[in-house]
Amino acid sequence: MSYQMKALAASALLAWSAAGVAADIKIGVAEALTGPAAKYGVAIKNGFTLAADELNAKGGVNGSKIVLVVEDEQGKKEEAINVFKKLIFQDKVLMVFGPTLSNSAFAADPIANASKTVVFGTSNTADGITNMGPFTFRNSVMEADVLPVTTRAAVKQFGIKKVAVLYGNDDAFTKSGYDVFKAALEAQKIAVTDTETYAKGDVDFKAQLTKIKASNPDAIICSCLAEEAANIILQTRSLGMKQPFVGGNGFNSPKLFEIAKDGADNTLMGSPWSSENPSSANKKFMADYKAKFGGDPDQFAAQAFDAMQIVAEALGKVKLSGNLEKDRLALRDALPAVKFDGATGKFAFRRAAPQGGKEGGYDAQQDAIVNIAKGGKFILLK
């Protein structure tokens, strides 16, 4: 064979090989990997990593490898905005997972909607997140769906007739949780003896807790993130108060027990996930997570793991064209129909109501599980 013929054959082989290899699917991950919210963000990143590695080990999606483009948004609104712009316009990812906190989602999600790019929250539970536009999705169950269930369970478990309330008044998640708790307490005719607030970063809660103690509640409702909740519990116990706590999924972090230890016993918390869920999918997820990262997963890792699987299910029904604008829209159109049964149980999307003339996105349709703290961990409330 002549040199020219060999060159032509090699060129043809290369062209065939390039055509036969599917392009990578770039997916943005914007999470708080440093700062106070890193206790959630790192677990979330681990959940995505585990799912992507498992999917790629099976051949990816339609032969395409999933590549995570990870950025640290530090749990700050301004950083979330910068990271979203980088991922969407510079890195040209197909979609974005994140950010970690609801505050940051309210700041950054409009960028995704304006660019017609799916933004998928796995830890944003504040009311109104998915009202920002039709490209906003989440598999994190809203506090509005979880907290009324948790409140009813607390009333039954502890015979509660009156409660005090403490919440962070400068954070979208904790403020939204307070609003839901307030409505649930009114609906269930539970008296509120005192309502106190704090600001993000506070570490001394003695003044608020002294007032709460004087009001003599049967329990303390706390719409807080894990670190603040743990310090509040510790300071409550130092004042000789033994009332049980009732909280949202912000409590669902090992950080609660690292700080509060057995002071957190009898705390009730609602969540879509429990380590005691006996399903084969959850057992496998927990074992695989521990093998890969050397520690036990939490709710946020589980939700991230399932979210990646949900997106993979949708992508399996999409023929990516290489035209980013068309592919982003195709993913958005395929996602709402996905029904999934994973580490967090059975999941489906439901459409959010339009608000302010804007088309809504998609919320999680999933049952809440109520857990109680015993011996340094949450277990299912029987």
Image (cartoon, rainbow, N blue to C red):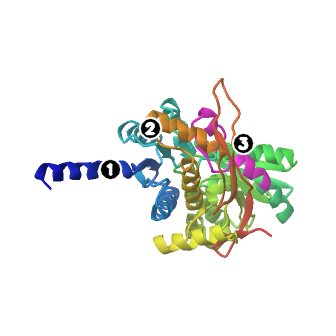
Residue at the spot 57% in from the left edge and 36% down from the top edge: 135
Residue at the spot 63% in from the left edge and 51% down from the top edge: 140
Q: What label sits on residue 345 in the rendered view?
A: none
- According to the image, label 2 marks what residue? 81
Question: Is disc 2 placed on a helix, strand or loop?
Answer: helix
3 and 2 marks in contact (CB < 8 Å): no
| Residue 58: image location, x then y, percent | 49, 64
| Residue 222: image location, x then y, percent | 68, 54
Q: CA distance from mark 3 to mark 2?
A: 26 Å
Rendered-image quadrant of the N terminus: bottom left
Q: Residues within 10 Å of mark 3 (few under 14, many from 20)?
A: some
Q: Is residue 82 left or right of residue 358?
A: left
User: Residues in magenta?
Assistant: 126-149
For discs 3 and 1, the disc positioned in front in the rendered view:
1
For discs 2 and 1, the disc positioned in front in the rendered view:
1
Q: CA distance from mark 3 to mark 1?
A: 60 Å
Kindly tell me whether residue 4 is visible in this rendering.
yes
Residue 144 included in the magenta stretch of the image: yes
| Residue 103: image location, x then y, percent | 55, 42
* Amino acid at dot 2: Ile
* Amino acid at dot 3: Asp
2 and 1 marks in contact (CB < 8 Å): no
| Residue 265: image location, x then y, percent | 69, 70
Kindly tell me whether residue 204 is visible in this rendering.
no
Q: Residues within 10 Å of mark 2 (few under 14, many from 20)?
A: many
Q: Nearer the viewer, residue 160 or 23?
A: 23
Q: Residues within 10 Å of mark 1 (few under 14, many from 20)?
A: few
Q: Nearer the viewer, residue 15 or 322?
A: 15
Rendered-image quadrant of the C terminus: bottom right
- According to the image, label 1 marks what residue? 16
Q: What label sits on residue 179 in the rendered view?
A: 3
Question: Is disc 1 placed on a helix, strand or loop?
Answer: helix
